[in-house]
Image (spheres, grey):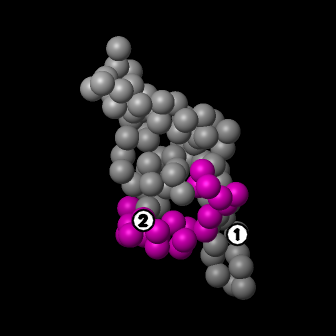
Amino acid sequence: MFKDLDPILHSQLRLAIISLLIGVKEAEFNYLKEKTNATAGNLSVQISKLKEAGYIEVVKQYKDNYPQTICRITPKGRKAFEEYVEDLQTYLNSRK
């Protein structure tokens, strides 16, 4: 009846990152840091885990001589998020 929840997305910060990226084309590291209230180090680690899972792509570049990190959700990440939400619904609907 209950499906296992995706362990990659079941982390609060990783879920927050994916949730933010679902609604935008791309987001800069500082935007994600501000919205999630995460430390730079923790955010960096969680972004790396999402990238390794293939859920996001990360582009590192320079803007006005400053490093800039841009994150985008991948089709695999979008699908994983949709499945995660559906799996959560089975838990919520079981109470009815």
Q: In the image, what residue occupies the spot 38% across and 21% down?
A: 3
Q: Would you name the residue on which mark 2 appears? A: 36
Q: Is residue 17 above or below residue 30?
A: above
Q: Is residue 79 above or below residue 42?
A: above
Quarter of the picture holding the N terminus: top left
Q: In the drawing, does residue 39 fall left or right of residue 52?
A: left
**What's the magenta region?**
21-42
**Residue at the left extreme?**
95
Taking the view exactly as shown, the residue that stands out farthest to the bottom is 64
Is residue 36 covered in magenta?
A: yes
Q: Secondary structure at mark 2?
A: helix
The type of residue carrying mark 2 is: Thr
Mark 2 Cα shell of 10 Å, populated few (<14), some (14-19), many (≥20): some
Q: CA distance from mark 2 to mark 1?
A: 22 Å
Task: Tell which of 32 and 58 is nearer to you.
Answer: 32
Return the residue at label 1: 61
Residue 70, position as x, y percentages in the image? 64, 63
